[in-house]
Amino acid sequence: MFRNVIVRVPSETICNGITSADLGKPNYKLALKQHEEYVSALSKTGVNVTVLQPHDEYPDSCFVEDVALCTRECVIITRPGADSRRKEAELPDMLETLNNFYTHIEYIEEPGTVEAGDIMMVGDHFYIGESARTNRAGAEQVIAILEKYGLSGSIVPLQEVLHLKTGTTYLENNNLLVAGEFKSVPDFEKFHRIEVEDEEAYGANCIWVNDYVIVPEGYPKVKKAIKALGYKVLVVDTSEFRKIDGGLSCLSLRF
Ligand code: GLY
């Protein structure tokens, strides 16, 4: 169960966010509206939402998931692999907010890089994507920290997508949504896997929050499959965030 969520309002500079999507620039007003709808959907799940203010210097800073790994025992402040995002993990308002919730605060150090969009929590185990943003040194630091607190981690190399959770979502109850390269990860064979077709691959980035699953607008097969598993589904349009390679999970820290 999650009690708390942290989000950051998108900045007007969101149109300069890193992207490989080739879908055009985000419309700022629409991004703000979609962000409000996202917060409203999260609030329906019973969590307390802390909303941080925008930071114009960091176009991608609404993707707060990448700057911290929130576990039941500690928070790990990451060291983002993208140069333009590195200092997002040092923003004082985020650090102060996390400090209000956590006694144990840990840090990823050079030469490690980690973006927590690469880390998927399954109970007390954390799957860590080794990606263009999260390197092996960073992943090993995460595992060493987790083990100090009686938690565990393992590495899942990825090639095709930005972050691990770009293409896979744990929906609790042993259910795992998988798209693309994650359909054939041996470590995931033990889960009940719900395979997402390539044309709906973006829809594999959902979030489970307290028996609700928030699903992006426009992926009817994903929505139908999740409903069929018995979850309560909330739909939020993330079209403007998709334009800069973002999705539902990147937009919040949930703990
Ligand atoms: N634009 C999101 C990212 O590249 O991290």
Image (cartoon, grey):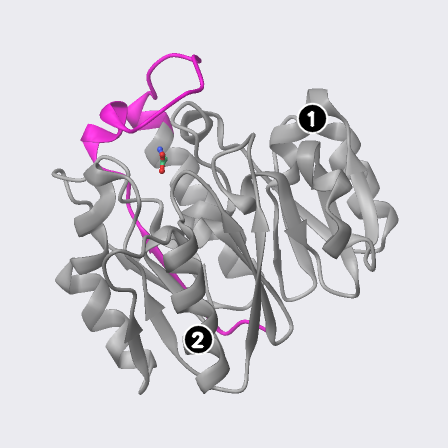
Residue 109 screen position, x and y as percent: 25, 64
Classify 208 as above or below 81. below
Residue 197 screen position, x and y as percent: 77, 27
Q: CA distance from mark 1 to mark 2?
A: 36 Å
Residue 53 screen position, x and y as percent: 20, 51
Identify the disc placed on residue 1.
none
Residue drawn at (32%, 84%), measured in percent from left and top? 104
Name the amino acid type tagged 2. Answer: Ala
Mark 1, ligand 1, within 8 Å: the answer is no
Residue drawn at (44%, 59%), measured in percent from left and top? 139
Classify 252 as above or below 4. above
Residue drawn at (49%, 32%), measured in percent from left and top? 238
Q: Left or right: 51 with respect to 171?
A: left
Q: Left or right: 48 with respect to 121?
A: left
How many residues crowd around disc 1 within 10 Å: few (fewer than 14), some, or many (20 or more)? some
Classify 246 as above or below 174. above
Q: Which residue is mark 1?
A: 200
Q: Which one is in front, 39 or 178? A: 178
Name the amino acid type tagged 1. Answer: Glu
Q: Which corner quadrant of the image does residue 253 belong to?
A: bottom left
In the image, which residues are magenta? 1-30
Q: Which residue is mark 2?
A: 144
Residue drawn at (68%, 35%), measured in percent from left and top? 181
